[in-house]
Image (cartoon, helix red, strand yellow):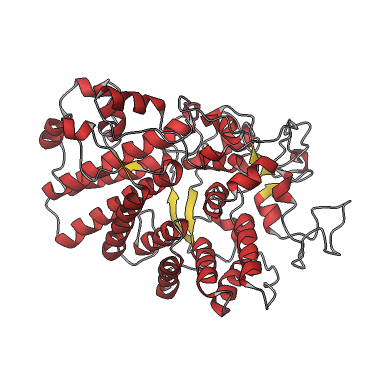
Amino acid sequence: MKKLFLFIITLSGLGIFSSCKKDFLQKDPLAQLSQNTFWKTQSDADLALAGCYNFLCRGNNAVSVSNAGAGFGGGYMFWETLTDNGYTISSGGNFSMVSTGNIEATMTGIISDAYKYSYQAIATCNLFLVRIGDIPLSQSLRNQYIGEVKFIRAYHYFLLSQLYGDCVLTLKPLSFDQASITIPRSPKSLVVDSILADLDYAAANLPNTNYNGHAVRGTALAYKAKVLLANGQYQKAADAAKLVMTENKFKLADAYSSLFLKPGQNNNPEIMFSARYSPPSFYSPQDWLFSYLNNVNVLKYLVDDYECTDGLPIQSSPLFNSTTPYANRDPRLKMSIIVPGDWRGTTAATAFDPKAAAVPSGFLPRKGIDPSRFPTTYATQSDQDWVLMRYADVLLMYAEAQNEVAGPDGTVYAAINAVRTRPDVNMPQIPLGLSATDMRTRIRHERRIEFAMEGQRFFDLKRWRFDRTIIPTIKDPNNAYRSFPLRDTIWPIPQTEIEIAKSVGNTGFKQNPGY
């Protein structure tokens, strides 16, 4: 049992050694393997760094769609099914169980995967940070490597803190000694402090350039704003987002649709961080999951929330006609969602019929789905990256934080209007004279529309404390209402971890309330 605990929490993160098999703990000890065969050259550092980034795509094998999983990399859209945006009947990742409030500490799927993969990534990062000193590099280059890996570690601790609250906080490799196996869970506030410290180091040591697949200064600052916003530190969040804006290394892409498919993603000035793919050696299951299997349906709640082109909701706009309900709507609707009659491929013969396609919600995602590959198959290899951070998020995070601090000043209007008025969206600007409360509602609406089906809304609802009020109102296509026990605001620690901790006398490692 002790060996299993350490496999999950500390040593199993060695994704950098892609040839290792599941029984690697029975082979040479890690320290001996590293000292004798690795950590010698800059090429070793690059391989290890790639292993750290690879965890962004964990949850799916990325070299075999048969192992495609939900919640990570090309499967990130599954997070939408936990909200009023999406629905799934797939068993992938147990998202359907989580969405209906049927969470148990013994569940497999996303409840355990988010925990397991995050700690594997953190273990890999911690090992990297210790061993990078063994490789002869200039100090500035070493600091850059360290900055990238500290950013990745912060990314995974941020996910853990949002989902599970208090975390086992370890910033160095663990071993089989008593001190390692009895580390307690640290308060979430201390975990957040550690996340921010890592992001500050990254921002200070990463190049201040456009994103090229490696985290850069702007990436770290954007995530700093996101972490601060999630923890109610509005002034600091606004300051971090503003710094990205004033340093002017990123901008909105002219074409909204260019953000989600290759080649538009290549050198896109808006993309700040992504899970990246390069077939045939490393490909995404995106088209297979969401076009062949139709694993994620879009709910009508989201479709109805898109404004008409006059900036008014469909309930009050004179442009809305119930006989042609998808005409005269925010252009992002058709760029994000496939509605009945839309072509799924490149010919009229691919027009979407929800009944024929067995899509109970009546709508499918368009965003990130390549029509040139339709009809997709089990063997379809997708090359599109999954975008995790883009400049539009920085603008809307700034607007949200600044509105909480100072109300809807001119900078708040400028930020949200920039997102609404990019050339291929061209929606009307937000009306002047709004109160802080009205502007808050507008910003929240804009986030829902701008990031529809990108996996953001689950975390937005959590931040706004709307999960507990909105989710129980959702009526799924099977005519069942969802439930949201208040305990679900944080997820249970996987029960296997609790049992292992008990077996080694780790009294500080306790289960979350209600599980």
Q: Is residue 505 above or below residue 48?
A: above
| 337 horizontally vs 139: left or right | right
Q: Is residue 34 above or below residue 327?
A: above
Looking at the rendered structure, the number of numbered marks drawn on it comes to 0
Visible residue check, residue 515: yes
| 72 horizontally vs 297: left or right | left
Residue nearest the observer in this picture, 379 or 62: 62
The spot of residue 113 in percent (x, y) is 43, 33
Q: Quadrant of the N terminus?
A: top left
Write down the quadrant of residue 354 in the picture: top right
The residue at the point 68 percent across, 48 percent down is: 337
Visible residue check, residue 63: no
Residue nearest the observer in this picture, 235 or 454: 235
The spot of residue 132 in percent (x, y) is 17, 48
The spot of residue 142 in percent (x, y) is 19, 56
Q: Is residue 163 above or below residue 440?
A: above
The residue at the point 30 percent across, 25 percent down is: 502
The residue at the point 28 percent across, 38 percent down is: 184
| 126 horizontally vs 223: left or right | left
The spot of residue 168 in percent (x, y) is 31, 40
Q: Is residue 214 above or below residue 128?
A: below
Write down the quadrant of residue 19 in the picture: top left
The residue at the point 67 percent across, 57 percent down is: 332
